[in-house]
Every structure is written in C-alpha cells, then in structure tokens.
Image (cartoon, rainbow, N blue to C red):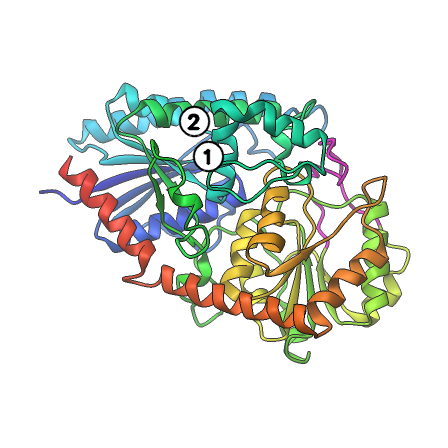
Amino acid sequence: MANPNFLIVAFAGQSHINPAFQLAGRLLRTGASVTFTTTTTAHRSMSGIQASDRLTFATYSDGAEEGPKLSNFSLEQHMEDSARRCSEAVRQIIEASRGKGENFTCIFYTAVAPWVGEVARCYDIPSGVLWIQPATLFEIYYYYINGYGDSITNESNDPSSPTQLPGLPPLTGRDVPTFLTPGSPFRFLFTLIEKEIQSLKGDRKARLLVNSFDALESEQLNAIDELKMVAVGPLLPSLEGRGSSGASPGGDLFLGSRDYIEWLDTQPAASVVYISFGSISALSKPQKEEMARGLLSTGRPFLWVIKKALIMDGGDGDGKQEESEDQLSCMEELQKQGMIVPWCSQVEVLSHPSVGCFVTHCGWNSTLESVVCGVPMVAFPLWADQLANAMLIQDVWKVGVRVSGNERGVVEGEELTRCLEMVLGGGERSEGMRGNAKRLKDAAREAGKEGGCADKNLKALLEELVSG
C-alpha cells in the first residue's frame, strides 16, 4: 500500500500558516507525503523552509505580489477573490496529482475557507478543517446556528447577563466573538464559518481537527455529539525542537534584528513584561500612550513590539485600517526602562527565563504559545475570538487577568498597572496563576511529545483515513 498523501491548504495569514505547517510536520513524521498550498506572497515570506522528498509546495497568486494596496482595501472583496483563486488552484493540484497516477488521502484546510471542502467533495476526497481557534469558539459558533442565536445575541447586548451553553463556561457579553455582534463589519466572516459547520455536519467524510489539547479543553472537545473533534494541538514551533541558531521551524512572515535576546539575557528572572498584539491587530495612538503610561508606572523592564502594520481593529471594534507609525510622547523615558522592537521571535521570547508576564491581544496562537511556555498573561483582547480567549485565560484556566476599558473603550494606564501588579507583584493570586501556568505548561508538552495524546489522536485519524 502506498504511503498516505495529504494536501494542506493554508489561508495566507500568520495565524493560519504556522499551525498548518506544524500539522504538515506531524504528518511527515508518520511517513506520509504532504503538498502544502498557500499564496505565492505568503510562501515567499516563509523563512527557513525548504521542500524535500515528501514535502512539496504548490502556490497560487493572490494578486498581491507587488505589495499590499491599503487604499480602498476591502477584506470582504479580498475573501471573495481568495475563494475563486484558491478553488481553482486546488482543482489544478488535484488534477495534476491524478495525472501522475496519485490520489490525495485527505485534504486539510484552515478555517474560513469552506470552498476547499466544496472542491474536495467534487472529487470525492475526504477533507478536514484545521480549526485554528479553541474548541470553545467552535462551539459558540455551532450553538449560535443551532438554536442559541437569540440567547447569544441578547447577551452581547447585555454584558451583565451570562448565558450557559452546553459544555461551556458561562458567557457574558464581553466574551462573545465580535463576528456575532449586531452591526459587525466582519459578519461576512461568520457566514464562512457557518458554511463550514454545515458542511461538517452533512459530510460523513469530513473531519474536524482542533489546535488544542485534552487537558486544556477536555469538556469542550467532547461537548457536541454529532461532531467528533480531534485534538491535535498544541501545533506550535516550540514543541518541534530548536536548531543551533535558536530558530524554531515554522512560517514566520516577519523578520528583524535579534538584539532583544541579548537585552533579555541581562534582565533578572521572571522580571520582564512582554507586550505584543500579533501580526494583524494594533493599538490606536491614545491607547498606546496609556499603555506607555502604565508601563512606566510599574518601573518594571519590558519588551514591547510596536510594528508598522495594517490595523484590522484600532481597539474600538470598528475594523478601520490605517498605518501605525505614531511616535510616543514619552519615548525617551520608555527606552531607559525597556526595549521597543518592530518584530521578535515570540516563542523564543516567551521561552526566555527573564520573561514574567505577557500582555497579549489573546489571539489563539499567542495564547497557546504563552500556555506552552508557562507564562502568565494580562489579557487585552481587541476583537474576534480574542474576547472569548480572554475569558478562558482569566476565568477558566486562571493563568492571567483581563483588563477593563473605560467608557471610551480605552484601557487606562492605571488599569494596566493594576493588572501587571496582580500578575507580577506576588501574593496568593499571583502565585496561583504561576502554579496554574506551570501545570498547563507541563500538560501541553506532554500532549505534544511523541506518543502524547495529540500524536495518538492524529495517528488514529490517519489509520481511519487509510483504511477507508
């Protein structure tokens, strides 16, 4: 019998490419062959990754090879174009493979790309969604379209009124993904998720892989009877080994200087506050000024990533786009106390013994990386799934605290200082968070190692696929 042959289709974003490529690595270690597909632009930006005998790349144009065009940019139109271009590319890859007498055992694709599953069904090829958010988020969306929509919508309008969904912790309005809130400019993304969920329910050959692990979401992973979730996480470079250079295998779309590591080496253990808001989201100028004020007030050393980036949400939930190049008014004082960089290797930073707290936007990759590295968090969610992830961090896992904004939605400097001191200032709650973070770190590494639960879950799935 020929070795299994998989096609992985990754949406062109850091939060999609990284877990998808880690899944590819897991599949390769079983002896399978993998074709990894993403846009030409994203592939060119992936550092340190080369094809091999069993790993090939098949890219397609997203029309952005000449660089991003921010004027009149429409994410909804971009997604429509992606659906058309990606669908055609997947068809061509399948046809080319069949022309060589080869068939794909299964096609895995990252979330919000239901068109890939549609193509797979046209060719009668089993498919699987790689859900790159927690199982909790999938269930919120699932229940929204299966009888709980009004309850969830009502709670989004009334932050003080919790709703209990089967198998989930109580949700309040501040925990509801912004895709579901009335008037959201990103409602069209939920439409894609809805199509994905309906396809999974109606296709006996479809699988749902989740970038989570049993000890983190044991109840949530088993809450939906008609859909089996396969926990294959944590899919992170930090579990895949490190080379002599300290780099982790993965798909980094951003590169820069590494002077920050030398600076971290000079700091006391568990003393540094690390601040980063991911590869897409960024803070408004007023919010950055308040962030700076709060950091200076603590007197603690910090490493803060401030990048020039496309802002999908300026912190007020309106989805505005702008270029962030604002100079902070207190830059001189900040540079005396800490270090500001445009980019860093996040896993490497979180693994450094001098880092004691992570101020995070609560994107799922960042959240998992902090869990795997055992670093307590200050949860600073902006939009999308980040709100529910912040709830998990503070209320369920108890590995961090969540900031609260003022009436304008701005988190004031005093609030940030308060949260940082709760995490770093000692005392019973601080020690409890550190203990919980250590426990989850150990569980994550146990899940991700060879022979761990993620390894066993994936091998069982492959046996099922190969046996038909």
What secondary structure do most residues of the magenta stretch adopt?
loop
Name the residue that disc number 2 marks. 196
Q: Is disc 1 placed on a helix, strand or loop?
A: loop
Residue 358 in view of the camera: yes
Percent position (x, y) of residue 330?
A: 89, 60
Asked if disc 2 and disc 1 are in contact, CB closer than 8 Å, the reply is: yes
In the depicted structure, whether residue 349 falls above or below residue 116: below
Q: Residue at x 22, y 36 (%)?
A: 105
Residue 272 lies left or right of residue 413; in this view the side is: left
Residue neighbourhood size for the residue with mark 2, other residues' Cα within 10 Å, grouped as few (<14), some (14–19), many (≥20):
many
Residue 88 lies left or right of residue 11; in this view the side is: left
Percent position (x, y) of residue 113?
A: 45, 29
| Nearer to us in this view, 27 or 205 | 205
The residue mark sitting in front, 2 or 1, is: 2
State the image quarter where residue 94 is shown: top left
Q: Looking at numbered disc 1 in the image, what kind of residue is underneath it?
A: Ala
Percent position (x, y) of residue 163?
A: 60, 35
Badge 2 or badge 1: first in the primary sequence? 1
Q: Which residues are magenta?
A: 306-326
Name the residue that disc number 1 marks. 111
Residue 82 in view of the camera: no
In the depicted structure, whether residue 424 falls above or below residue 20: below
Residue 102 lies left or right of residue 389; in this view the side is: left
Q: What is the residue that sits farthest to the left in this orientation?
A: 1
Q: Residue at x 46, y 41 (%)?
A: 167
Q: Is disc 2 placed on a helix, strand or loop?
A: helix
